[in-house]
Amino acid sequence: MRWWRITKRNADLERELQSDLALEEEEQRERGLSSEDARYAALRAFGNPTLIREQTHATWSWSWLESLASDLKYGYRGMCRNAGSTVFAILIVGLGIGGASTVFSVVNALLLRPLAFRDPGQLVWISNAENYSTQAEHYSDLRDQNQSFSDLAGWAQFYNSGDQELTGTGEPQRLTSVAVTGNLFALLGVEPAIGRLFTKEECQGKYSAPPAALLSDSFWRRRFASDPNVVGQKLTLNNQPVTVAGVLPPSFDFTSVFIPGTPIDIFVPWPLTDQTKPAGNTMAIVGRLKPGATVESAQAELTVLAKHLESEHPERNPVTPTLVPLEEHVSGQVRPALVVLMWAVGVVMLIVCANLSHLQMARMGTRQKEMAIRAALGAGRFRLLRQVLTESVILSCCGAALGLLLAVAGTRGLAHLHAFNLPLLESVRVDGSTLAFTLLAAVASGVLFGLAPALQVPAYKLREGLQDSGRESSGSGRHGWFRDGLVVSQFALACMLLLGAALLMQSFVRVLDVNLGFQPVHAAALRIDPGVRISSLAQQDSFIDDVLHRARSIPGVTAAGISDVLPLDGDRGWQVSAKGQVYDKNHHPEAFIRVVSDGYFEALGIALQSGRAFTESDRASSEPVVMVNETMARTLWPGQDAVGQMVTQDGGRRVVGVVADVHHGGPESLGGSEMYLPMRQTGDYAAMKLVVRTALPPDSLAAGIRTVLRPLDPNLPVTEFETLQGLVDKVVSPRRFLVILLSGFAGFALLLASLGIYALISYSVNQRTKEIGIRMALGASSSLVRRGVLTRTLLLALAGVALGTVGSFAFSKWIESLLFGTTPTNPAVFSGVSLLLCVVALVAAYVPARRASRIEPLQALRTE
Amino acid sequence: MAKQVQQRANLLQGTLDMLILRTLVYGPAHGHHIGKHIQRTTNDFLQMQHGSLYPALHRLEERGWVVSKWETAPDRNREFKYYRLTEKGRKQLVVEESEWKQMAEAVARVMWPATEEN
């Protein structure tokens, strides 16, 4: 409805009332009353014109709009009148909603929003038993023989960061490539942004020399400055020509979905027919269900099919297909953490609401007179209630606007945290659903914190309201329990959040304290593969000798060694057996394989437990040897000394030393068996990583290494130095992420709770000025008064802590899966948090308590 | 006294619309006129509360049962807002009247059963 029409109708009503009133007056006059008496009589007969006007307005269909406009106007005026508390309210709502919206964006990206593939609900992750990969031969047979899937695609899970060396034009650079079956992109529904996908011929070449490659969008932007002409050109990868078939679209974020934290630069075809393709369990499989097929039915079919394949091909590895919807696989691991975060922001919002509720009640208290006058002028109970609610919703919406800004900044920050090992983090942003959520949160919290003060309105009796000086005379009696309840609930909620945060923080510290089996500090690694230029073991050995001698000659480097895999980074595993021992096929011991040179254990700081470490003289010409970790020694030779024993590897290798276990899967998981092969006795490894132990900063180390290794390999790209500490940080990053966010929320909650108790105690001291004055006049000492106030504070805080503790016990089961090295009912954490809360409460109440103790009895009695 | 007024107001709640429509059957009238008419006809038993009269008039107009127009009164030299019954309003009056009749009969049967039987 247009504004001018409302105005016109208003004028019309005004004219109608005036003319009828005039008529009434005339009639009264005709009865013989004097003109003044006639006027009053007419007004009496007519009733309250304002009320008539209001009630008539209410019958108009757009009256709600009109009253909303006036509510907004009043609300705005009210906000300006109390600028200080308005700013405070907007600030804390803003912080609360900012946090909530940011977390919602993360939850939305990781849990709610469908993956950026075609029909992502049809996609299924097919792992082998407990998340192992599958043999490519099994993949081919499963793909050909199943009925449930329209197609299966796979990619090589055992790629290495920096596998490909890009030479030719520009700086030489190491690229990370992943081999994929030709149908992967079609299956996911991904079209190249430029160029084409792989042709059939390109998928039948050599595994070691892919004929074509697809570039990821970020690599294309970085390396080729978004030049579309790069498509069709030939690049030199590992000294082989590779045609650029196309560029994938920016929306295709393979990394953040499948392997968070390891950016992929290029995709190469995986020729399944090539016999040089990697043997063993190396393939990760994704399937697209046919319409009508379910995960359960497909699981049943593949289980039967796999049994059949196992009996038909006893020479292959066992296969136990395990199906999970892809979306569940991607977000499953982060789900518990996100659920905790969601609860945390919910709790924070409740505390914000409790805090503002108290603030609004105090403001309403000072506006008692205004409300009483408006009620006297005919404003209905509902109308006043709505007015108060409108004011609080305006406040919360202003806060939401601020919160939205914070959320935009927060999500931008999060999306660029590449160091965090979380899936889909890069797609976190403020989108339509975040906006909707923010609006909902704003209105809901506005109504929630406005409700108590609004319901208080009708309690104002007309006479009381007009008589009183504006202070809520009987307030502490009537609403006292409610105010106390607000503060107690704030403390209870803050207590729960603090407990959760403290437990997770303690877990994080415990995780960092875990003895990883190696010393990440002061260790750094760099890929130095000479690539294809090495053709014999002798050539390889002299390269190793050269590199190690040169690296050790750099001042500041205390140890240097070479390995194919770094701890926390790879998990190539083989079956291992002690010589002369027969094992059950289904329970065959397995060990992770590391191919290392001499100096490796020293460089990484892995402790030698018995025997000796590899030396320069462990070569092809000497006795084949091997080193094992303690777990493997225990597993293969229980109760015996492993040193001197033989394993069946390569026709028999003698164990020369036992080293400490390394937590290769991260601090929270045990390592399992590990077997170390001397690099100079084998060519069976995919990468060469130089590991050095040094106190030098990474930059000068890189410069030093470049200088000494240049003569060996002028093309050696030495930019990608990684510190072992960086690897550890990456592994613990999801936990760090959770701890940082949760501590932030807990800190905010603590601040709010302390503000809440400060406000309550100040308020009650103000209310009781007279009473305290009388008591002091009667001889109460100021310390007694102060003690009284502080005791009350402490009781409130303790009630909150008790409630919060009970609440935490109820929720403890649920945080348990996120804890490490502590229990959800850790008494030290509980008592620490309780103590913290009580101290904070006392500190917050100290200022008003001191004010109470300095009340001058005479003045207090006079002012009232 | 206050109690009495309260009772009258309650009685009027549902029936005011009907009374207004019935009054307008005699021809167009302005608000004051309608109020006075009801008051006079009931021998001042129903004191017209303007507080409910004007909202009721505007409500009836919203529903399309009456239309309004500013016209000069025959006896006064001024314009008044005259309300006129529409066809829709006439039908509504019939409906409300029969409902009211049923209601009154039902109440009567409960209140004075003997009279009913005789």
Image (cartoon, coloured by chain):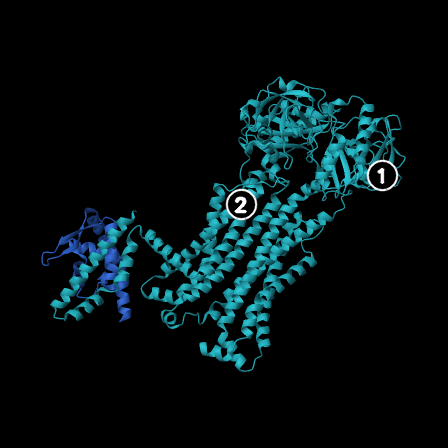
Q: Quadrant of the C terminus of chain A?
A: bottom left
Q: Is residue A511 left or right of residue A106?
A: right
Of the two numbered discs 2 and 1 in the rendering, the one whose residue sits closer to the viewer:
2
- The colour of chain A is cyan
- How packed mark 1 is, by other alpha carbons closer than 10 Å (few <14, some 14-19, many 20 or more), is many
Q: Is residue A77 left or right of residue A711?
A: left
Residue A658 numbered tag: 1
- How packed mark 2 is, by other alpha carbons closer than 10 Å (few <14, some 14-19, many 20 or more), is some
Residue A516 in the image, given as x and y percentages of width and height: 76, 44
**In which chain is the residue bearing label 2?**
A
Q: Label 2, label 1: how many angstroms apart (C-alpha)?
A: 51 Å
Residue A595 in the image, given as x and y percentages of width and height: 79, 32
Task: Kindly tell me whether residue B109 is visible in this rendering.
Answer: no
Residue A410 in the image, given as x and y percentages of width and height: 55, 46
Q: Helix, strand or loop at disc 2?
A: helix
**In which chain is the residue bearing label 1?**
A
Q: Is residue A856 left or right of residue B109?
A: right
What chain is the blue one? B
Q: Helix, strand or loop at disc 1?
A: strand
Quadrant of the rendered image containing residue A291: top right
Seen in the picture, residue A753 relative to A398 is either above or below; the reply is: below
Frontmost residue, A618 versus A137: A618
Task: Kindly tell me whether residue A719 is visible in this rendering.
Answer: yes
Mark 2 or mark 1, earlier in chain: 2
Residue A676 in the image, given as x and y percentages of width and height: 81, 34
The residue that label 2 is drawn on is A409
Amino acid type of disc 1?
Answer: Val
